[in-house]
Image (spheres, rainbow, N blue to C red):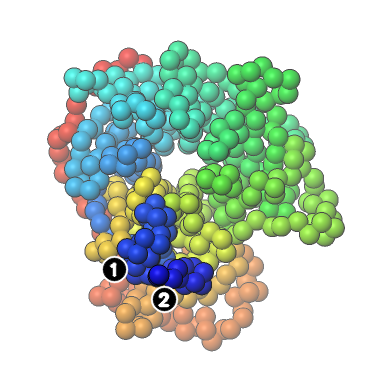
Amino acid sequence: MSRRPSKRQRSSDHSVVRIWERELGQLPNRSFSNRFSASEHLLHRLGLHKKLQKHTGCVNTVSFNADGDILLSGSDDRQVILWDWDTATVKLSFDSGHCNNIFQAKFMPFSDDRSIVTSAADGQVRYSKILESGQVETCLLGIHQGQVHKLAIEPGSPFSFYTCGEDGVVKHFDLRTRVATNLFTCKEAKFNLVVYLNAIAVDPRNPGLLAVAGMDEYARVYDIRSYRSEGWYNYAEPVDHFCPAHLIGNGHVGITGLAFSEQSELLASYSDEFIYLFSPDMGMGANPPSSSETETEMRKTKKTQPQVYKEHSNRETVKGVGFFGPKCEYVVSGSDCGRIFIWRKKDGELLRAMEADKHVVNCVVSHPHMPLMSSSGIETDIKIWTPGGTEELTSPGTAKEASVSGNSRWFLFYDDEGDDHARGYYVEDDSDDEEEDEDDSDDDSSDDDVSAEEEGDSDVDVEIRKDNDEDDDGGKDDVVDRG
């Protein structure tokens, strides 16, 4: 009789061991698939698979369909493109009807990938329907009094979704009636001022909970079930607030991205700060305390602090944030330095810092079933990252940071031979100079290395160059604008 491997053996992350266990019938296929997809070995093998090139402006949004075979993108060129990402070919391209940059585009669930909703800098929320003939009908659903950076689909619904705008308003849309309903205007409690909103997310395990965030320190959660049921409580008031204790009362931070995990954890990316992960029990309730009250309460109760993810830079644009892995084992984000950062969720350890854009990476989205991801940013192309991709990428094991106060300042990335002049970048630092006086000799040597790189060490500089788009109308169909 064969013996089962010990618990210690089974906890190994080694992929070969997993395959051996599956072949012996000791690991179910689904468990094997999940563990293999979440393997750090696979994560460290992520490389550039394809570049998708047709947009002529910055690509602000990318998302996969439910099956994962089509990628949807929107851009400053106001075009919406459906891609066969594996072959880097355009399946369909059409004019969205927006009159300014597209910020978000998503497929509606269970629509055979024919229903697409978009939001943009013009404040419009639009609906595009792909007809059997190949034509595309577009119509205007509603308008915010300000830019609309994000929208959130109600999980499992082919008709219902939400938007938030810089006017602070949260709207609900129903495609059956094509009616936009103003749910509430987000306001801060102290002076009753409108909060300009950047991000919105729906809890996949509890679709009645909606989180929004913007130009202040709080991620607010609303229970909107009473919107449909006419319950006794006021759905226009938040039922919970989330914020790191040290940021309460900080008027210089805001939140650019939100995401819920499959475990109902809330991930928030702060501008000019870090990324934080909150479990549901970390909420501060409907009426959050002041900073001094919070510190006193924390000393008394020893309340658990949110997990923090550092070393990226989020200053220049409205960046999203998300999870990677079948059970959200990793946290992913773009950065002002043009890299994709990947952290282990449970302890915040930085595992990868991959070169992805010459300027800024704004979007990083995970495939719904496979261990791959897509990214986009200031460049006009979209990049697909898969295990075994052809592009050589850097990792935090070869990175040295001269300052860890606030966001990343100097990074030097070493080449395979260990030369420290391979690549450097600088993010402007507004902090006090007193920390820069420490280890002067180290700073001087770093400055010398970067100077050498700027003067002509381009032969070892890893760079993804921007290709010019061709004037190609392939894949572009007629659009009927009914807005």
In this view of the protein, can residue 64 be seen by the observer? Answer: yes
Left or right: 218 with respect to 333?
Answer: right
In this view of the protein, can residue 99 be seen by the observer? Answer: no
Q: Which residue matches tag 2?
A: 398
Residue 453 at x, y percent in the picture: 35, 76
Query: Could you tell me which residue is drawn at 45 percent across and 13 percent down?
Result: 177
Residue 48 at x, y percent in the picture: 28, 59
Q: Nearer the viewer, residue 323 or 296?
A: 323
Query: Under tag 1, what secondary structure?
Result: loop
Tag on residue 31? none
Query: Could you tell me which residue is drawn at 36 percent across and 72 percent down?
Result: 423
Residue 260 at x, y percent in the picture: 54, 44
Q: Nearer the viewer, residue 431 or 235?
A: 235
Q: Nearer the viewer, residue 246 or 49?
A: 49
- For the C terminus, the quadrant is top left
Left or right: 221 with respect to 469?
Answer: right
Amino acid at circle 2 = Thr
Q: Of all residues shown, which one is farthest toward the bottom? A: 441
Is 452 placed above or below 377 here?
Answer: below
Amino acid at circle 1 = Glu
Q: Which residue matches tag 1?
A: 392
Mark 2 neighbour density, 10 Å: few (under 14) some (14–19) many (20 or more): some
Label 2 vs 1, first from the N-terminus = 1
Residue 16 at x, y percent in the picture: 34, 70
